[in-house]
């Protein structure tokens, strides 16, 4: 969804446009297909396991998330951001990734008993010790990824990610049906990451050997450190709810909450990162042309919200029959939480789009400062929300994230050369039809007679889909045509904005 300046179409680089479109098709396309397979397995596993299992698993994820922000992903981004890195720098990155991740595995193994004591759940220590193995796979995923991303080659990566999604899904189903309980949730990612490490190393075809002499790698370490700092504050935001609530809520209630959160964050956590991966590489190529980045960001945001808004509003207004149908009867208590969380997700989705653009412009420090604000704002909101139990915790997301989005936009938009009014104008046509769709679905739901939840869900989804697409076609036909042109890789002349280059898919 990135664009070169529309005022100078003759200067557009066809090779960059083609790379951008191909990258998104492969990265996002494989992500979608892979996630469909993964979701099919995940929802089956959810129906088999209990909320208690997911509550225990969520406790371990707090530790993994905190330690993973030190796994060197920021270093890999630093290599992507450097267009002409020397071989010594590349080898040093490889060495850094190995040292960091093997060290993190050892740290997690050592602190496992302390974490179990904090949550008052002894089994958490055993789960964490086994999960420590995953760190050994990270260097052999992150390093090949950096090499391929520098070349904007996401085709090979997509194939590996697709294959690993299948192996992880098979492992999850096998564990669930074998009665492994919570250990199913440990087995599946372990199989997935082993497959991914082997596959990424193979398809990259790199000949580099790790170098453990890190002299002269200061610039790479500094950039990576800033990226890691930003990720650290992101982790504090994203894991603070479980860290705080884990000592207050029982594992079953925590499981209801985290599974509801998983359902509502499917789009922002599974699909948006795929777009951001490509976006960072393209923005880095375009960083000297701020007009191109500004226009690209506005249009990227519009295309993302074109899908995100009806998805989230649809989740909110169909939460009851959706949860009963997809997750099963044992999860119906999660429906009110899904409804509240879904309403917060549009703000979160838009907020996470800012980070790759800002970092690619050479300003990761702004992400760090913004992350620091979020690391205070969100935990504070969670603490206050918990005064009203798990429902208050879910509701706190809505209030906190809209404030956080406003702060992020205020700090980052000037770097991109984009005004808040221009961004609002870009995404506004996606908001109105989604709200109208939601109101219509609620109205239909109130007049429908009692019936099977599956049939009710099908009627509501069909009505909502027709309402949303119909509104767009009548009142914002140009956006529909823009989206079609994006998929086809064709230029589109949107009124008042000029030609939309084929990079709109990035």
Image (cartoon, helix red, strand yellow):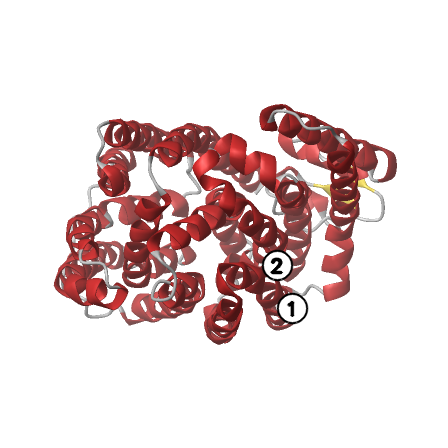
Percent position of residue 45, x then y:
35, 33
Q: Nearer the viewer, mark 1 or mark 2?
A: 1
Residue 301 in view, yes or no: yes
Asked whether, in this view, residue 410 is left or right of residue 256, the answer is right
Of residues 492 and 374, the one nearer the viewer is: 374
Of residues 405 and 367, the one nearer the viewer is: 405
Q: Say if mark 1 contacts mark 2, CB within 8 Å.
A: no
Please tell me which of labels 1 and 2 falls first in the chain.
2
Q: Residues within 10 Å of mark 1 (few under 14, many from 20)?
A: few
Q: Which residue is mark 2?
A: 289
Asked whether, in this view, residue 275 is left or right of residue 158, the answer is right
Percent position of residue 393, x then y:
51, 63
Residue 488 in view, yes or no: no
Q: Which residue is mark 1?
A: 406
Of residues 290 and 452, the one nearer the viewer is: 452
**Inter-mark Cα distance, 1 to 2:** 25 Å
Q: Secondary structure at mark 1?
A: helix
Q: Is residue 171 above or below residue 395?
A: above
Q: Residues within 10 Å of mark 2 (few under 14, many from 20)?
A: some
């Amino acid at each position: 969804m990135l664009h070169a300046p529309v005022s100078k179409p003759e200067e557009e680089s066809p090779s960059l446009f083609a790379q951008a479109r191909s990258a998104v098709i492969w990265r996002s396309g494989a992500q979608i297909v892979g996630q469909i397979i993964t979701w099919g397995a995940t929802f089956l596993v959810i129906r088999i396991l209990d909320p208690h299992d997911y509550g225990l698993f969520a406790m371990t994820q707090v530790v993994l998330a905190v330690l993973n922000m030190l796994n060197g992903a920021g270093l890999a981004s630093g290599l992507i951001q450097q267009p002409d890195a020397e071989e010594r720098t590349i080898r040093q990155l490889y060495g850094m990734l190995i040292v960091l991740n093997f060290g993190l595995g050892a740290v997690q193994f050592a602190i496992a008993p302390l974490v179990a004591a904090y949550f008052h759940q002894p089994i958490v220590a055993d789960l964490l010790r086994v999960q420590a193995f995953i760190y050994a796979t990270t260097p052999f995923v992150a390093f090949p990824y950096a090499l391929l991303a520098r070349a904007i080659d996401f085709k090979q990566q997509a194939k590996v990610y697709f294959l690993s999604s299948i192996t992880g899904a098979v492992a999850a189903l096998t564990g669930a049906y074998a009665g492994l309980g919570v250990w199913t949730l440990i087995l599946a990612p372990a199989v997935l990451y082993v497959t991914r490490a082997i596959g990424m190393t193979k398809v990259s075809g790199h000949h580099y050997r790790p170098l453990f002499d890190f002299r002269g790698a200061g610039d790479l370490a500094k950039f990576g450190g800033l990226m890691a700092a930003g990720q650290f504050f992101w982790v504090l935001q994203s894991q603070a709810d479980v860290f705080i609530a884990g000592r207050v809520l029982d594992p079953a209630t925590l499981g209801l909450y985290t599974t509801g959160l998983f359902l509502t964050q499917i789009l922002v956590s599974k699909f948006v990162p795929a777009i951001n991966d490509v976006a960072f590489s393209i923005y880095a190529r375009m960083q000297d042309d701020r007009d191109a980045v500004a226009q690209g960001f506005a249009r990227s945001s519009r295309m993302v919200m074109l899908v995100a808004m009806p998805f989230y509003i649809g989740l909110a207004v169909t939460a009851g029959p959706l949860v009963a149908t997809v997750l099963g009867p044992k999860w119906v208590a999660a429906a009110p939480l899904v409804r509240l969380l879904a309403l917060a997700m549009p703000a979160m989705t838009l907020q996470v789009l800012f980070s790759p653009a800002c970092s690619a412009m050479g300003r990761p420090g702004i992400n760090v400062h913004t992350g620091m604000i979020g690391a205070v704002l969100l935990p504070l909101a969670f603490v206050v929300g918990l005064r009203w139990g798990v429902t208050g915790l879910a509701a706190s997301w809505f209030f906190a994230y809209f404030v956080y989005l406003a702060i992020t936009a205020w700090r980052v938009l000037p770097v991109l050369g984009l005004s808040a009014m221009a961004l609002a104008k870009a995404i506004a046509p996606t908001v109105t039809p989604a709200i109208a769709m939601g109101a219509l679905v609620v109205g239909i739901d109130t007049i429908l007679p009692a019936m099977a939840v599956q049939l009710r869900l099908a009627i509501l989804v069909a009505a909502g889909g027709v309402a949303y697409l119909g509104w767009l076609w009548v009142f914002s036909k140009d956006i529909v045509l823009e989206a079609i042109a994006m998929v086809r890789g064709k230029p589109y002349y949107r009124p008042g904005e000029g030609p939309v280059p084929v990079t709109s898919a990035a």
